[in-house]
Image (spheres, rainbow, N blue to C red):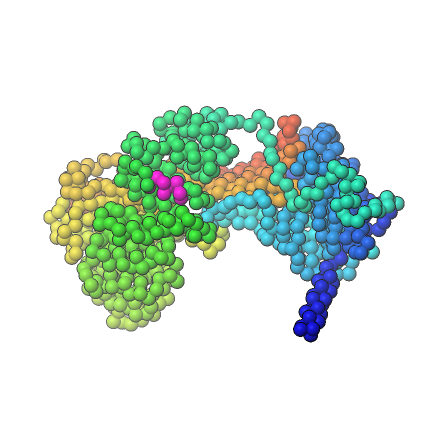
Amino acid sequence: MLALFVLLLCITSSFSASTRGAGAAGPRLNNDQLYKFSYTTEVLVDRAKGSKDGSVGYRISSDVDVNLVWRDPSSKDDQLIQLVISNVKIKSVAQRSAKKNIFEGATTQSLLGENKLAALERPFMVHLKNGKVSSFYCYKAEPASIKNLKRGVASLLQVQSRSGKVIENDVSGRCTVEYKASQGQVIRTKALETCKTAETGFTTYIQVLGVSGESSSVTVFTLEDGFIKSATAKETHILAVNARRTTAAKIVSRQNLTLVTIEAGPFEAAGKNVASVVKSLDEKLYAVGVTAEKVKSQCKGCQSLFEHWQEVQKQFEPDSLSKAIAPRRFLALIQSIRKASKDEILQVLKSSTKTALPQVVDAVTSSQTPASLDAMLQFLNFADPKGLVLQERFLYACGFASHPNERMLQALVDISKGKIVSNDIKESVVIIMGALVHKLCQKGGCELPTVVEVKKMILEGPDSTQVESDVQMYLLALKNSLLPEAIPLFSKYAESEVGAYCTISLTALQRYDVALITDEVKQTVNRVYHQNRRVYEKNVRAAAADVVFSSNPSYMEVKNMLLSIGNLPRELNKYMLSKVNDILHFEMPASKILRQAMKDMISHNYDRFSKVGSSSAFSGFMARTADATTTYSLDILYSGSGVLRRSNMNIYGASNGAMLHGLQVAIEAQGMESLIAAKPDEGEEDLESFAGMSALLFDVQLRPVTFFKGYSDLMSKMFSMSGEPMNVVKGLILLTDHSQVIQLQSGLKANAEFQGGLAIDISGGMEVSLWYRESKTSVNNKGAMVVTGNVTVDMDFVRTGMEVSFETEASLDFITTVQFSEYPFLVCMQMDKTTFPFSESLTKYESLPSGKRYVSRRGHKQLLPGSEFPLHQENSNMCKRVFDSDW
């Protein structure tokens, strides 16, 4: 026992000794000496590649006197020091003429005010322990902005003379810091991404539409005789929109502390510890944290939400939705709503016109504050059949939410349990709940109680009912959720006898990461394509083929697919040939294994690859820039009689390795052979006449809409060629939503807000005319987009910042015309982009509370020509024949 005690004592002693030795000493002050420093800090805001002369910002300079107040007799590195700031001056950071310099003629007292200047020049104390700020003492009643500036000075005294990584607290927060020491110099590099502060922001979950940043913070200390001779710090933050990195802003903060002279100073105070010494010197000094305090911004003369709404309400009318002014006003209104109370928001909702109200619902819901959600839940009545448009707009805005929380999902759960008068709304509620589950899981919230409840509901939903529409509803919700647990369920329903279940399940499987598609799932999908157990509709087999090709197929899987060509129904043969050629020419992931399989002449020969038909699959580039790539794909599948069976248009965006499924519009039709006395294809003999559209927008599957269902409904609509297109989705969507508080080491604080808004109108229709022996399907996409970035450094005595933005208006139409006056039918597909404007702007500003302002504006506008996107050559030849026959 004695030996064990001695051993433990030795271990403890050696541990304590190593701990004391690891404490790297910092700067040491001498007794009865006054260290006089000059101090400057400046902040600049500009575009990413801007120069100092073109920046906006300001510089604060002063003298700083430092002296030792007390030292622990047992430790030379345990010191209480006093700092006094004096001779404060504030100037513009850029060289400008007197007319453009807002600081010209202004004194420090007139800028700060007498009370704030007095507070800034009031002495404060810092407890330094082994070169780290242990405590910060100042007057409790001092303004937070003044205390933060003092903290910025104190942070420059924090240094250690040995190399290594440590975790430090300073004005920026609790950060990981690396020191590199050499003879007479120490370089401190702060990992800003590790800093933990009380003020946090948010960002959109969609990386392609998000904002990325680069930050650095380096301080170089020059030491002499164990004390700081100079400290020079530079901190840089660059924020850019991922999809267009020229829409960016840069914040540069510099600090410089230089020892000027050393004079005789006061003697040390007597005392046992820091707290007692501070109390004996000044009872009004309080210990506060060294991390920056939150500064409450006061807006004098700012508009109320209702006043703001009265100014912009005309731009929320439907006629303005195709113009860029609509999303710009939408983004500005969201900012106002985020500062408003529930009652203020309700006032705007109740005062809006009937035509503008749906757009107001978009803005209020997109604001995503507790007050805005409470206002919407009080305003909407889901038992009212007259409010269906507003109810759906609210649900869609929830689905597109940039940073939803559990409370929003819980609100939808409560709505689903209440009285809902419309089946369409009931379906939308559940489908959108699936989208929110996916977003919350992406942010690590999969185990939140409400998420767990909804996951259980939608996973058990398909097997809990025999109602076809309800089963589809749950499958669509699961398709939005992208839950790995749903893959076995999709695999099961992919082999269902109901074609709609199969299609939803197969298209859902295609959205999953390839790593989650197991061999068992692949076997199921291959069984569907090859009809090993039952006969399936053509569009189901086509969807199965898409899953196989996109899921890292094996050599035998691809070879069997190729061998099936020639034994398929006529139009499915042609579709598969087009799909194979599209994969090869567009260099998709399956192209390599496909080329290997095609070396076998049995699977790749003229007999198989010469099949004719109208169906097609084609992919191409819409736009390619250094920052982002946009691609499109058009898949068309016809029935053997030449009538449209499925049309599928997709637009994808890719940026920095991330992918976004921006748009999918699928039109399906079935049971229309009776119109032209044609024979249905195998497996489709008993299908009810139907045509409808399904849309997926920004990774969110929306509720499908129906053009007609049943023979009588079909007959009532087939004679008209001038029917109004049916709306699929219309409204204002918040795409980019990034808010960030950047606490600078100087004590100043920057706020960054990047937002992107889209006004969108997607409609589509299917028209059939027996008189002209022609059918036409159309998908019309109109949109206007605005992206803005606003970075401000807002102190209560001066405000500086900049806004970068770009905006555009565009229209994209996809039209398929089929003439069945002769056989084989003539089919022409067109995908047109109209000429559209594009503009960028840059605004820099500085302002004082007195109203004095400096503003610099630059802009660039251009008109981008329209074009018709290319498809395969066969389509071009067919379109010539269609238009020649029209003429």
* Magenta span dominant secondary structure: helix
Q: Residue at x 51, y 33 (%)?
A: 339
Among the 4 quarters of the image, the one containing residue 17: bottom right
Let me know if residue 318 is in the magenta part.
Answer: no
Q: Where are the magenta residues, as a range?
A: 409-416
Q: Percent x, y for residue 312? A: 46, 28
Res. 31 visible in picture:
yes
Above or below, 130 against 394 in this view is: below
Which quarter shows the N terminus?
bottom right
Which quarter shows the C terminus?
top left
Q: Residue at x 36, y 43 (%)?
A: 413
Among the 4 quarters of the image, the one containing residue 279: top right
Q: Residue at x 27, y 37 (%)?
A: 422
Taking the image as shown, residue 135 lies to the left or right of residue 415, namely right
Let me know if residue 412 is in the magenta part.
Answer: yes
Above or below, 348 against 883 in this view is: above
Taking the image as shown, residue 114 lies to the left or right of residue 674, namely right
Q: Nearer the viewer, residue 619 or 336?
A: 336
